[in-house]
Image (cartoon, coloured by chain):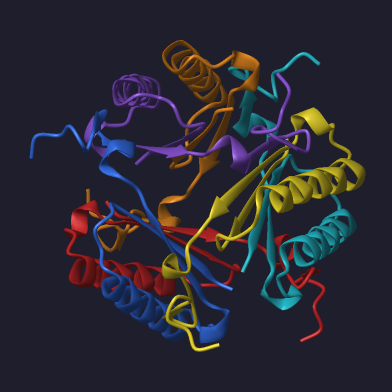
Chain colours: A cyan, B orange, C purple, D red, E blue, F yellow
Amino acid sequence: MPIVRVEMWPGRTPSQKAELARVITEAVVTIAHTTPHETIVIFEDVSKGNWAVGGVLSSEAQV
Amino acid sequence: MPIVRVEMWPGRTPSQKAELARVITEAVVTIAHTTPHETIVIFEDVSKGNWAVGGVLSSEAQV
Amino acid sequence: MPIVRVEMWPGRTPSQKAELARVITEAVVTIAHTTPHETIVIFEDVSKGNWAVGGVLSSEAQV
Amino acid sequence: MPIVRVEMWPGRTPSQKAELARVITEAVVTIAHTTPHETIVIFEDVSKGNWAVGGVLSSEAQV
Amino acid sequence: MPIVRVEMWPGRTPSQKAELARVITEAVVTIAHTTPHETIVIFEDVSKGNWAVGGVLSSEAQV
Amino acid sequence: MPIVRVEMWPGRTPSQKAELARVITEAVVTIAHTTPHETIVIFEDVSKGNWAVGGVLSSEAQV
């Protein structure tokens, strides 16, 4: 405990994920008082064609 | 708010997903009184080899 | 198949949820060509104290 | 009902997943008194580069 | 690793959940070759008013 | 985008959750280069009776 799940569009590098995992784990350990080795962080890459905001797929959105 | 997540077997086209995202968002906005740009729809394609009903993977099911 | 999951703040009435389940199921059946009795819709009520946008819990957000 | 979701690193064979789905479904049916055809098991393969324990991605962990 | 998540209607007793956790963990350890202390099982009780099949909330379904 | 989900045992105060949401959002914005107002953090309190490690519910575990 705890389990943290991060859903983002693809494109983050392994080192960005490594850094995120490290910092999020640190935050959870420090603020929520858990121990690091019980803290799991899972990343899910969700493509823009599978992510819609306002009823429009992000793959088709005009930015 | 809100977040809608749709898990289906693969095979839906981008335009089917776009249509689904549009109609689901419309439904949530109209019925649950949210604003469209705060409504997120996420699709997850789950292969038949990762989906079991009645203890049998759908990839192996006799239809 | 499929499974649809709707996360919203609490406050929707049973009849709003019933209507949402009906309309979303209809959309999935019509657009993604599934059969109704295989379509599951699950609602999750997430309190504003458990939902943050922009780093601020919605329970504390100034609207 | 119910829905069981199993997140693991990739590498399990289809026959391991088939066996897991069968045994988990049997357990749920027997212990929680559900009927098999209403029991869904979904597998999610999460790569080691998307799974961190103790703030370290499993792809980078020294075993 | 792995994480197993079981969504069911409420009503299972603590001892049914304990038994399910034990048996599912055993299955995962035996079949997927994981170690028990890395295997997490999480239960989520979803009320019938939050669970719809075929577009009908289970709280309103005629059995 | 992105959506972060934190599952923990109950017991964290609103101000711990507020602090966690703030720090996690900051980390995601800084490291993954997203904008704060598109970053959602959701907390899920999972009771020890619904959380098992090594096949044993945490509500029954001997610490």
- In this rendering, the answer to whether B45 lies above or below E31 is above
Q: Quadrant of residue A10?
A: top right
Q: Is residue E53 left or right of residue E29?
A: left
Q: Nearer the viewer, residue A18 or C14?
A: C14
Q: Please state the horizontal and vertical placement of residue C8, each as a whole percent of the image.
A: 50, 31
**Residue in view at x 43 percent, y 42 percent:** B9
Q: Is residue F13 left or right of residue A24?
A: left
Q: Is residue A18 left or right of residue A34?
A: right
Q: Please state the horizontal and vertical placement of residue A44, each as a whole percent of the image.
A: 66, 50
- In this rendering, the answer to whether B47 lies above or below B18 is below
**Residue in view at x 55 percent, y 60 percent:** F10
Looking at the rendered image, the quarter that the C terminus of chain A falls into is: top right
Looking at the rendered image, the quarter that the N terminus of chain A falls into is: bottom right
Q: Is residue B12 left or right of residue E16?
A: right
Tally the numbered discs.
Answer: 0
Q: Please state the horizontal and vertical placement of residue F27, each as a whole percent of the image.
A: 86, 48
Q: Nearer the viewer, residue E26 or E42?
A: E42
Q: Quadrant of residue B54?
A: bottom left
**Residue in view at x 44 percent, y 68 percent:** D14
Q: Name the outermost residue toward the left.
A: E63
Q: Please state the horizontal and vertical placement of residue C20, each as a whole percent of the image.
A: 36, 22
**Residue in view at x 26 percent, y 72 percent:** E16
Q: Quadrant of residue A26?
A: bottom right
